[in-house]
Each structure stands twice: as C-alpha cells, then as structure tokens.
Image (cartoon, rainbow, N blue to C red):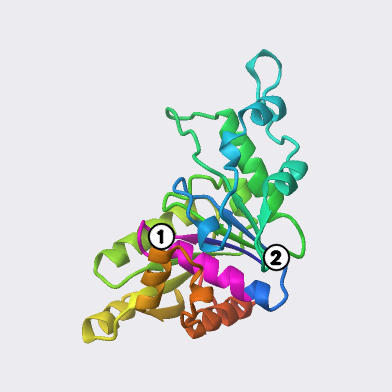
Amino acid sequence: MKIAVSGKGGVGKTTITAMLSYLFAKDGYKVIAIDCDSSINLPSVLGVKEVTPLSKLENVIEERVKGPLGTYKLNPKVDDIFERYSVKNKYGIRVLALGTIEKGGEGCFCPQNAFLRAILRYAIFRKRDILFLDMEAGIEHLGRGTAKGVDILIAVIEPGKRSIETLRRIKKLAEDIGIKRIGVVMNKYIDSNSSKKLMEEIEDEILGIIPYNQCFVQADVENIPPYELGCEVSAFERIKERLIEVINGSDVQS
C-alpha cells in the first residue's frame, strides 16, 4: 500500500501521516514514512530526533548520479542508501527525509532531482511495505513514472471556502502525473452548518473527518508524538480502515 499525503502548509498533513504510520505499525505492518517536504517535520512527529536529508549527500550524489561528459544516470543505485540513511523509531517505522529539491530553471534536471526520485522509485516499488509520503502541496518530488506506483493520494484540507480551491489544485497536480485515486481528509473540523455545507461541495471520496482537538496543538508545542501524549486516535483509526477498504478494491472515485 503506497500512500501520498498532500495539502497546503498548516493543514496537518504531517500529523496525519505520522498518526496513520503509527497505527499501521501498531497493527504489525512494516511501515516506511518519507518526508518529501522541504520543511522537514515528519521525523520529529514520529519521535526521530536526527535524520540526514538525502539531498545533502553531495559526495554520494556526485558518485552515484553523475556520468562522463556532464551526463546523469537516470537510475542510480540507491538500495544501500535507503537502508543506511533511514532511521527506525521505537515502533519500527523506517523514517527518511528527502530534503530540498533543486528546481532551477524551466526543464532543469539536476543530480539531486535524479537521486531523490530514484529513492522514491525504490521505496514505492518495494514489496510488502506500507509507504507514506508526506508531500509538499506541489508534489514536486514525484515524476510521472514514479507516481504510477502510488495507490492513493490523500488531500488534507480544513474547513473554509479556500479548501475547495486547494483540493482542486491538488487533484489537478495529481492527475497531471498519473495519480488517479484521490481521497479527502477534512482536518480540524468544527461541527456547524457552514462546515456541513462545505462537505457537501466535495466531489471526491471522503476518507474521514478529524475533529479539532487541542491535544494535537499541545503535542506540537511540546514536540511529542501525539499518540504518546494520549491524543484521541479514533478518527485516524477509521481513516486507516477506510484506506484498507479502498485500496483493496472498493468504491473510491477516480
């Protein structure tokens, strides 16, 4: 099961990625969680204090990606890099951070880009793993070929009219690179008539609704994984079960 999680800054996508990773790991699944956001936060939410951003491995990238006469290798060897620079937390979740991708000018194809996408391809096409990708809203790290291995993209939104426009942008970006399954998670939900009307405007599969809970704010302030602070997990449990149903072939919209 390969799941990408996207949303604009501050909607809680990293917390949701961490909570779902924890719940799958607790049930005995082999879980990999990769932070693809240039602002690296996922490792700390999973209780990992130090992780090396892979984009910073300049000597390794030079060795693995660059070829003669200024050429680049499209499929550099990365399996050993994956094992060496990932860190397991105490629940057995293997955590990696890609780091900042160099975008450069139009059409730029830099060594870091090739290296990081090779890491993602390796992770996505590993068998028997549950993989979570905590993405930037722009889904910059995923190329068209890599994205085809993703089972579903979770679009995290929060109450407000702008969330519908955010959802449209995420959906368009996902479709452009070949991700056909989109599921929506409404985070920080406060029960009201306006929130209910907003939910009615969402056309895609709604995987779950997470009520606003001050506990998650406190976990962020104290830099403690929310599940260790005793935050309510029932909404995340329901999302986990729905993901299993969806990816096993039920009625997600595409």
Report the quarter where the N terminus lies: bottom right
Q: Nearer the viewer, residue 98 or 123?
A: 98
Question: Mark 1 or mark 2: which is in front?
Answer: 2
Mark 1–mark 2 Cα distance, whole angstroms, equals: 26 Å
Please name whichever residue, 62 or 118, is drawn nearer the observer in this view of the structure.
Answer: 62
Question: Residue 220 sits in which quadrant?
Answer: bottom left
Instruction: Estimate the x, y position of residue 84 in percent, counting from the top left.
Output: 73, 45
Q: Secondary structure at mark 1?
A: loop
Q: Which residues are magenta?
A: 5-23
Please tell me whether residue 234 is drawn above or below residue 227 in the rendered image.
below
Q: Is residue 145 left or right of residue 160?
A: right
Disc with the residue nearer the chain's start (1 vs 2): 1
Q: Residues within 10 Å of mark 1 (few under 14, many from 20)?
A: many
Res 152 quadrant in image:
bottom right
Is 8 included in the stretch rendered in magenta? yes
Q: Which residue is mark 2?
A: 92
Q: Position of residue 113 (x, y in %)?
A: 57, 35
Q: Residue at x 39, y 74 (%)?
A: 186
Q: State the residue position of label 1.
A: 7
Task: Give the percent coordinates (x, y) of residue 164.
Answer: 31, 67
x then y, percent, for residue 41: 48, 55
The amino acid on which the numbered mark 2 sits, given as a three-letter code, is Gly
